[in-house]
């Protein structure tokens, strides 16, 4: 199959999204469900269908977190004009609970996404602070040492004396 290297002139022009008529986009008009109760009823009706449950179980078995699925569902509903962002944020916990209920009733192992995976990990900022404090303590201990304690005495027996030996990188060894 040959690659077509011709430029695509059907791409959107930068700033084109700002030229649409005000109110022509679904999220710019009044939402279909303006209260939390109406939005919850919308999601419950949608999530209790057999098709949705089968697809949801497949996605959960792939390891996608319930929180991620709920956020995707409510965000796409905001973009479709089903409800506004505020209602979506308030409905998200209910969607997550319903997803976990469906997974448990189908006896599917799932990832809730509610756990903090970094709970037991030490942040880089804390680690850097501890290292800086330890380095400062080491420097203070080094300055407290007596000059006699700094370097051990070296006897002439330990170091062989090489007299009249040529020195330097290019010196010839004998």
Image (cartoon, helix red, strand yellow):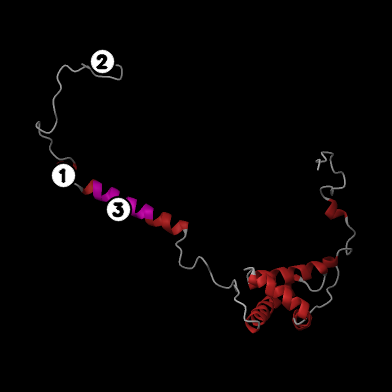
Above or below — where is 169 with respect to 86? above
Q: Secondary structure at mark 1?
A: helix
Marks 3 and 1 close (CB-CB < 8 Å): no
Question: How far apart are the two marked residues, 3 and 1, measured between alpha carbons?
Answer: 18 Å
Left or right side of 91 for 18: right
Left or right side of 27 for 103: left
In this rendering, the label closer to the viewer, 1 or 2: 2
Q: Residues within 10 Å of mark 2 (few under 14, many from 20)?
A: few
Label whose residue precedes the other's in the sequence (2 or 3)? 3
Question: How far apart are the two marked residues, 2 and 3, measured between alpha carbons?
Answer: 47 Å
Q: Secondary structure at mark 3?
A: helix
Residue hosting label 2: 172
Q: State which quadrant residue 78 falls in.
A: bottom right
Helix, strand or loop for the magenta stretch, by majority = helix
Question: How far apart are the two marked residues, 1 and 2, measured between alpha carbons?
Answer: 39 Å
In the image, residue 90 lies at what x, y percent? 69, 77
Q: Which residues are magenta?
A: 131-142
Q: State which quadrant residue 147 falls in.
A: top left
Left or right side of 106 for 162: left
Q: Residue at x 10, y 34 (%)?
A: 155
| Quadrant where the C terminus is found in the figure | top left
Marks 2 and 3 close (CB-CB < 8 Å): no
Q: Residues within 10 Å of mark 1 (few under 14, many from 20)?
A: few
Q: Residues within 10 Å of mark 3 (few under 14, many from 20)?
A: few
Above or below — where is 170 with respect to 68? above
Using the image as rendered, state which of residue 107 and residue 14 is in the foreground.
107
Q: Which mark is residue 149?
A: 1
In the image, residue 36 lies at what x, y percent? 75, 80
Q: Which mark is residue 137?
A: 3
Above or below — where is 117 with respect to 18? below
């Amino acid at each position: 199959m040959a690659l077509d290297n011709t430029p695509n002139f059907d791409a959107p022009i930068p700033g084109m999204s700002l030229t649409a008529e005000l109110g022509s986009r679904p999220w710019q008009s009044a939402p279909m469900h303006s209260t939390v109760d109406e939005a919850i009823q919308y999601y419950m009706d949608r999530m209790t269908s057999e098709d949705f449950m089968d697809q949801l179980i497949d996605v959960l078995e792939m390891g996608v977190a319930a929180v991620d699925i709920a956020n995707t569902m409510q965000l796409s509903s905001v973009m479709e004009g089903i409800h506004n962002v505020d209602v979506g944020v308030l409905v998200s916990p209910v969607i997550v609970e319903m997803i976990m209920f469906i997974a448990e009733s189908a006896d599917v192992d799932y990832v809730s996404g509610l756990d903090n995976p970094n709970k037991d990990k030490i942040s880089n900022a804390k680690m850097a602070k501890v290292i800086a404090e330890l380095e400062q303590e080491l420097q203070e201990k080094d300055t407290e040492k007596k000059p006699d304690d700094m370097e051990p005495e070296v006897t002439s027996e330990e170091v062989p004396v090489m007299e009249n030996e040529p020195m330097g990188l290019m010196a010839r060894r004998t």
